[in-house]
Image (tube, grey):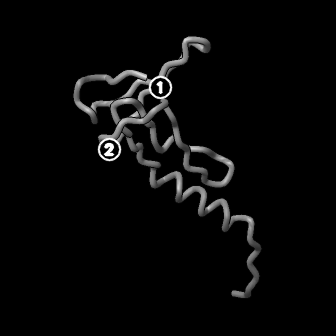
Amino acid sequence: MTRVSEDRFGGLIISSYENRSSAVVMPNEFESYPADNIKVSFKQIDDVHFLSKIETANGAYNIPVPHSATMVAGVKQHGDMSASGTN
C-alpha cells in the first residue's frame, strides 16, 4: 500500500504484485495511531464485502462504504418478500 500524495486524503494505492493489479481508494478519515501490523477491515452487506478500514504503522484510514451499496442491499432483502393485495 502506498499513498498517492503526501496528503492523507489524497488516495491510497493497494497493489498486488502476484496478480499484477491495483486499486485506488479514497479515505474520508485518518486516525493517528500506530498499528503493530498492517490490517484491513471489511463491512459485510448481504454476501458482499466492502473495504472499510486500513490500519498501518502510521495510523488508520477509514474508507466510506457507498450509500448506494447499502441501498442495494436493502432492496435485495425486501425483494425476497412476497406481497399480496387487491387494486
- Residue type highlighted by circle 1: Ala
Q: Which residue is mark 2?
A: 31
Mark drawn on residue 23: 1
Mark 1 / mark 2, whichever is N-terminal: 1
The image position of residue 18, as x and y in percent, is 61, 12
Q: Residues within 10 Å of mark 2 (few under 14, many from 20)?
A: few
The image position of residue 47, as x and y in percent, is 68, 49
Mark drawn on residue 49: none
- Residue type highlighted by circle 2: Glu
Name the residue at the left extreme: 7
Q: Residue at x 37, y 28 (%)?
A: 12
Q: Is residue 64 left or right of residue 51?
A: left
Mark 1–mark 2 Cα distance, whole angstroms, equals 21 Å
Quadrant where the N terminus is found in the figure: top left
The image position of residue 67, as x and y in percent, is 45, 55
Q: Residue at x 46, y 24 (%)?
A: 14
| Residue nearest the observer in this picture, 85 or 60 | 60
Q: Residue at x 69, y 87 (%)?
A: 87
